Image (cartoon, rainbow, N blue to C red):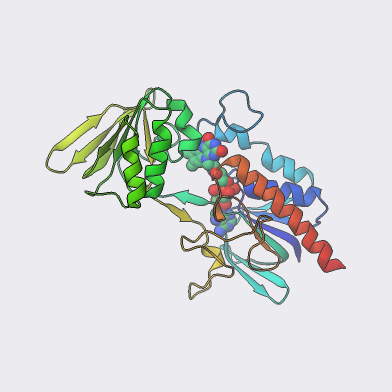
Amino acid sequence: MLDLAVVGGGPAGLTAGLYASRGGLKEVVLFEPGMPGGQITQSSEIENYPGQLSVISGIELMQNWLPQAERFGMKHELDEIVRVEKQGETFLLTAASGKTHEAQSVIFATGSVPKRAGFEGEEEFLGRGISTCATCDGFFYRGKEVAVIGGGDAALEEAMFLAKMCKKVYLIHRRDSFRAPPATVERLKECENLEQMLNARPVKVLGDAKSGVTGIRLAIDSQGERDLLVPGVFIFVGRTVKNGALQDDRGNFLCAVESNGEVIVDLKMHTSVDGLFAAGDVRALSPKQVVCAAADGAIAALEAIAYHERKAR
Ligand code: FAD
C-alpha cells in the first residue's frame, strides 16, 4: 500500500513527489511512462522560471528535479496509469504494464497537451519558432512580426496579448468568421497592428535547422498560396486534457470535471473525491506555466500529508 501515488512526472508531479517524501510520507511513487520532466522539455528556451538569469532549455531546467525528489525517498516507476478508482478508502491504480497498485492518496498531475493544427514542420519546429504559449514565448518576439493560428476565444485573447509587444500580428483562421464570442471579436478592432486573415490555412513552416522558423506558407481561399515572412508562429487550436485515467469504461469521471475535461479543484488542490488531488495543467483554471504547476504540486503534497494525519487520528 502506497502512502501516495503521483500520476505524471512534469513540474507538478515532481514537485508533489519532492514535498510529499521530504514532508514525511513513506511510500511515495511517481508514475511517468517516459523520462520525467514534462512538456517543458520540448522547449529550447525558457526564461521566465524565477531564479534563472539566462535563457536555458526545458531539459536543462528539469534535469535536477527527479534526483532531488529521489534524494528524499520518492521512487519513479516507468509506467503509465490507465485507470484510477476508489474502493472504500483505498485508491486502486491500474498501469499500462498490467500491474496494479494500491494507494491511500493520489495526486493527479498528467497535464494537458496543446492540439496541433496539422501542417508540415509544425512538430519539428515546436519550441523553436512554433509556440503554443504567448505568455511563455511572446517576449522573444517583441518588436517583431508573428502569426497566430486559430479562431476561438483563446486564439483571439493570445493574439491581442501578443499585439501589445509585437510589431505586427497576423491572425489566421480557416473559416470565414471567428468562433470566439462577438465581444472578443469586436475588441480585435482596437489592435491597430493586428491583421485578420480569414479563409486561410497553414500549409508548411518555412525555415531550416540553422535559421529556425523564417515564415509560414498559407493557402488562402480564392487567392492561392502566400508566404508570410515571420520568425514566430503561435498555434491556439484547443488542448487535449490528459484525464483518461480518471474515466471508467462508460466514460464516467471519478471526480468532478469541467465541460472541457479539466479537473475541478479548490484552492488547496482538493478534487471532489477525498484523498484525490489534482495539480498543474490538468486542473481547471491553471495558468499553464511551469512555476504555477510546481506551486500546485507543493500545495497538493502538503494537503496529502494533512489528509494522512487526519486519517491517522
Ligand atoms: P506536464 O508538463 O504536461 O507533465 C505531465 C506529465 O504527465 C507528462 O510527463 C506526461 O508524460 C505524464 N502523464 C500523462 N498522462 C499520464 C498517465 N496516464 N500516467 C502517467 N504519467 C502520465 N511554461 C513556462 O512557465 N514557461 C515557458 O517558457 C514555457 N514554454 C513552453 C514551451 C513549450 C514548447 C511547451 C509545450 C510548454 C511550455 N510551457 C512553458 C508550459 C509548461 O511546460 C507547462 O505549463 C508545464 O509543463 C505543466 O506542468 P504539469 O506538470 O502540469 O504537466
Left or right side of 240 for 312: right
Residue 168 appears in the rendering: yes
- Placement of 187 over or under 245, stated as above or below: above
- Residue at 62%, 23% in the rendered image: 53
Q: Nearer the viewer, residue 140 or 203?
A: 140
Residue 150 appears in the rendering: no
Give the tally of numbered discs.
Answer: 0
Image quarter where the C terminus lies is bottom right
- Placement of 166 over or under 97, stated as above or below: above
Q: Where residue 168 appears, x then y in whole percent?
A: 33, 28
Q: Where residue 215 appears, x then y in whole percent?
A: 30, 29
Q: Which residue is most to the left?
A: 222
Q: Where residue 169 appears, x then y in whole percent?
A: 33, 32
- Placement of 216 over or under 200, stated as above or below: above
Image quarter where the N terminus lies is bottom right
- Placement of 152 over or under 256, stated as above or below: above
Left or right side of 237 for 32: right
Q: Within the image, what quadrant is residue 219 found in?
A: top left
- Residue at 31%, 30% in the rendered image: 192
Q: Which residue is most to the right?
A: 313
Q: Nearer the viewer, residue 56 or 70?
A: 56
- Residue at 21%, 45% in the rendered image: 199
Q: Nearer the viewer, residue 209 or 177?
A: 177
Left or right side of 218 for 153: right
Q: Where residue 153 appears, x then y in whole percent?
A: 39, 49
